[in-house]
Each structure stands twice: as structure tokens, then as C-alpha cells.
Amino acid sequence: MTDVIVGIDLGTTNSEVAALMDGKVQVLATADGEQIMPSCVGLAPDGTLLVGTPARNQFGLYPERTVKSIKRLMGSDRSVTLGDRTFTPPEVSAIILRTLKQRAEAALGVPVGRAVITVPAYFSDAQRQATRDAGEIAGLEVVRILNEPTAAALAYGADRTGDRTVLVYDLGGGTFDVSLVQGQGEVTEVLASHGNNHLGGDDFDQLLLEHVVSRFTAATGVDPRGDRRAMSRLLHAVEEAKKRLSFEPYAHLREEYLAERDGVPVHLDLEVSRDDYEPLVRRLLEGTLDSVHHALTDAGKRPDQIDEILLVGGVTRTPLVTRLLAEVTGLTARQEVHPDLCVALGAGVLAARLAGHDIDRVLVDVSPYSFGPSYFGLRDGVPSEHCYHPIIPRNTPLPASRTDTYSTMVDNQDAWEVNVYQGDDPNALNNLLVGRFRIEGLAPVPAGNEVLCRMELDLDGILRVSAIEKRSGLAKHVTIEGATAALSETELATARERMRALFGDAGAADAADLDDDLAVDDDNVEGDDEVVDDREADAGDDAIDAPEDPVANAGHPAGATAAGRDRGGAGADDRREQRVAVSEARALLERSQRLLPRMTAADGEEALVLQQQIEETLQRGDWAQLRTLAAEIADLLFYVEER
């Protein structure tokens, strides 16, 4: 690495640095794994400089000593005050850039002195020069100022896929712009841009904040608007709720001792739904469509002349964005590349090319298929119990976790049979049934009782599906192994038999011996889940029905052959389930470690005990005990995440 050039996304809300590392362009992380750095700078009361997450955390206590969204002031004559010190916008941006420079040097192990820095396409000359000045102050030679939509196109490899016209819809924390980008050969050109440099996620946060404050005041009689620290805490809670509503239908906000009334502490404890949130922001999002039409008009293009739409910026995860764009263009927007990292990755691609490396695009792992449950609804205007829409659409970046909400159809309905399908057809029966399980014991209430269906798909193609009654927390889970796999074990065995016919018994025996050598007895199997091989769906319903009590049947894993059980040994299906269980148990352990800081003292103590017990059970290979422990820790983590 003789000529290191990094790519930097100097964002309004967050900033990142990317570079070529281990043969691919990637966003560089700190030692603790943080890739996205909040664009916040602050001075602690003792004068210590705070940058990134520490500064954002301080904002709740000392907003007067912290600055956010400095990008909005770039190119202006205004200054900001931190405590008793004053800084210009380029100086604050330089602090952010210097921190990213240090992060890159730590990750790459070499000095970094050159960078590609991105800016919005509509940035004026003064704003671009202020960005260059910030880079120079930070000790960086700015080799290129790159338009953000061009960076996004580079991340997707739009300049290496023939002549294409791409609409880049970029809705970040503090700015919005839409650009028409044309790729022809090695040339990527911005044909037209339109936007609003004072519209972004911050504005969405404010709308949701006002909604939450109004509900809090109505419920408690306390108005927190005059308390800066209370409002800062509320803003942080609202930001997290907004993020969650992109993937979940509900988000819960809890803040202890937010305010006082007559000397008595008043707590925030309320739930907001996506149905509450989307009407609040619809007007702002519909306003962005005017910019889409302006950009199309300026570029002399019609909607049907757009080849694809790329989504950039965290706010674009809001499902309403995709729906509105589809109504205007008829296209489903692409979002395979992490929308918060897309611009940084594109800057990293250009930086690598300028350093002499041939990089086409950013490579990401995505789901090749869509997954979702069937439900009762209207299909072509006719009631049908086989309606379907995906919870995890194909091309979703992995790992993925999504939740949707469904409702009971009749009064006192006490059960729901969840049929999980792979495919995109609105008629579930035209898709591939990959698993089925039943949640029983629903509350005896009128029709409309909400049941949440959560799907989690990991990099190994393991799909975990949960059905949770919203009012009680009653939950049932199923794990579907190899949801994205091309061939199941059964299909592979059939293929081996065909090879035997072609090559003879000796060759087949050699292959079987090799297969035995490669089979790893990984130690275990997982909790209160049923494990299903998705390709066994074609064998009939009995092959995929979950047992009534998977924990009670832990000694006989689904799919284990009778002969294998009679011998007391593990057959191929047993080993496969054990490998799945190992993966899931380790995933639960990692998830528990990640959530420990959010747990109460009692929950944390229980989690640590369960973690130790799972580790010991993995070593012993006690499958029945592992199922029980995994179920317990999965339930604990569910309640921690819901709080």
C-alpha cells in the first residue's frame, strides 16, 4: 500500500471513512467495531475534546457545549460556540475529518494523507471550498471533491454496466437531493440535480418529537419544552424510535425520571406505531417528489427512461419512501448497499481507482429470495386465505431482521397457523412453502388481536420466524435451515446416487467416505425452535409441521431418521440440525453480550448465568438441555429488546 487514498463521506448526521483493505473496499471501523461516527463535536466541562459518539452522548447533558449538523453551515460566515470557545464551520468539520483520518491509520497500519471527500451535488463553490479547507486543516490532501450521487452510483457499479440512467434519491440526516446520473463507459455524469439542503432526518425527528411531547403532556400534565436536558433526552429516544419503525410496526419509548411534577418524578412510557409516524412525515416526503419531477424535467427524461433507482441515506429505509417512488416511476428502488454507508463506499471505490487499483463495485451479501407468511385478505377484490406479501424482500442486505403485523379474523380466535413462503407472487400457493408452525393460546378477545411476525435471515441462510401476540408477549418460533440454499441434503443424496450410476460403487463409496470426513460434530442444538429443512416442503405437510412442544421432543430432532435414533447415533439429518443449533446458540450468545448494557441488574445477572450454562452445554453436547436454555435466553432477549 504505497499510495494510500481514502474515501470520506462527511455527512450532516454521520460520517464514515472507506478504503481498499484485504482486496475489497470497506468502511473502516474502530477497534470496537463502530463504522458510523456521529458528526458531533463537543467540549467536556473539563475542556476535553469529544468527537463522534462521546459528543453525541454529551449533547443530552450539555447541549451548549456540543455542535451537531455543522454541514448545514459550511460556506457561511457563521460560527459556533462550544463552552467559552468559538469555531468556524470548516474548523469543526476538520475535527471530524482528523478523527476519521486517525481511524483509517489505525485500521490500515500506515499514514494517511490523501482523501476523496463527498459533497451534495448542489453544493455551491463556497461550500465546496469550505470542504477543501476543512480537509487541509485536518492534514489531508483533498485529491477529489466527489458528488454524493456519483459516489452512490460508483458503489453500485453503475459506471461498469453499460449505458444506464440512474435516479439517486438521497435523503440523509440534514440534506436531501435527487440526481439523474448517466453512466456511459468509464464516464459517470450528473445530468441534473434538485433538492433541499435544509430537509433531512433532523426534520423528521422534530415532527415525531412534537408528537411524543404532545402525548406526554396530555398524559402527565407536564410540558418538558422548557427543559433543554429533558428535550435532548427525548430527541435521542425519538431518533432511536424512528430507526426502529423502519423495520418494526411499533417502537416503545421509555425514559425514567424525565421530569418532575410537584416534586414527584414523571416517567415517559409510551408506544408509537408506524401508522402514527408515516402520516406525520408524508407531507415532507411528497415534497421530495416535486424535486424528482424537477430533476427529470431538467435532464429531459421521462420516468419510463429511468433504468433504476438507488436509495441513499438512513431515512430512505422508511417504507413509505419506497412506496411513493414506486407510484411515480413504477420501479422498485434498490437498497442492497447499506444506505448509511453507500456514499462512503463509493468514495472508497474512486479512491482505490485513483491509487491504481481496478475496482468495479462494492460487493454485498443479499437475500436472493423473498420470504413472508400467508394471510387472509383481499386478492383481486376477492377474499382469500392465501394472500401474501414478503416481510423480507429479495435483495435485502444480510443479515436482515424485519417485522410486520397481522390481526385475528374472528372473535376469541385462539390460534394462528403460520405458513412461511419463499417467493414474490401475491398468491401464496404459487410460491414455495418452506415452513409451518402454529401459535396457540391467544387471548380470548374480539377480532383484530394483533400478532407480530418477525423474520430474521442470517448470512448462512438460516431463517428464524417468530409469531408474537402483541398484548401478552406470547411467542412461538421456528428455525428454517438453508432458506437460501440451492440444494438440500436430500437433493444432494439423490444427486450422489445418480453419480453412483455413472461412475460405479467405488466412486460413490469414496464420496461417502469423504462426506463422513467433512461432517463436523459441532456440539449442539438450539432452543424452543423447530428446525426445518426448507426443501422438504415438497414432501408434504407432515414433513414441515412443528411438533406441539418442540422442547419436550428435543430428544428426537425434526428430520432425524428412525434408524439413526434406534442406533442411538447421529444420522446426517441429526448432524445438520446440530450444526444449525450451534450457529443459533452462538448467535444468541453474541446477541446477549450486545444487549447486556441495556439490561437491568436482575436481567443482566440472569443473562450471564444463561450464557455460562449454554457454553457448558455446548461443550457437553447435551442437546435437550441446550434447547431449554436457548428458549429461556431467547425469551429474555425478546423482552429486553421490546423495552
Image (cartoon, grey):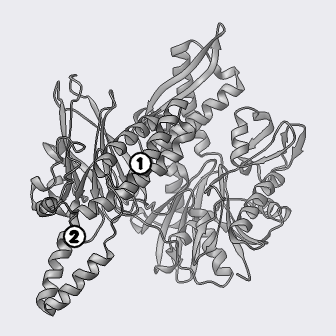
Horizontal arrangement in the rendering, residue 482 relative to residue 435 (left or right): right
Residue picked out by circle 1: 614
Query: Of residues 457 and 516, which is closer to you in this image?
Result: 516
Q: Which residue is outermost to the top?
A: 262
Q: Which of pointers 2 and 1 lies earlier in the amino acid sequence?
A: 2
Image quarter where the N terminus lies is bottom right
Query: Is residue 619 depicted above or below 299 in this figure?
Result: above
Disc 2 on helix, strand or loop? helix
Q: Give the label on residue 57, or none.
A: none
- Which residue shows up at 52% across the image and 80% down it? 184
Q: Which residue is outermost to the bottom?
A: 503
Query: Is residue 254 among the parts visible in the rendering?
Result: yes
Q: Quadrant of residue 125?
A: bottom right
Three-letter amino acid code at the position of disc 1: Ile
Query: Of residues 623 and 259, which is closer to you in this image?
Result: 623
Disc 1 on helix, strand or loop? helix
Three-letter amino acid code at the position of disc 2: Glu
Query: Is residue 138 depicted above or below 205 in this figure?
Result: below
Q: Tell me residue 508's x, y (percent).
A: 18, 86
Q: Tell me residue 90's x, y (percent).
A: 82, 55
- Which residue shows up at 81% across the image and 39% down it? 44
Q: Nearer the viewer, mark 2 or mark 1?
A: 1
Q: Tell me residue 239's x, y (percent).
A: 57, 39
Classify 10 Å Cα crowding around label 1: few (below 14), some (14-19), many (20 and above): many
- Which residue shows up at 59% across the image and 16% down it? 266
Residue picked out by circle 2: 489
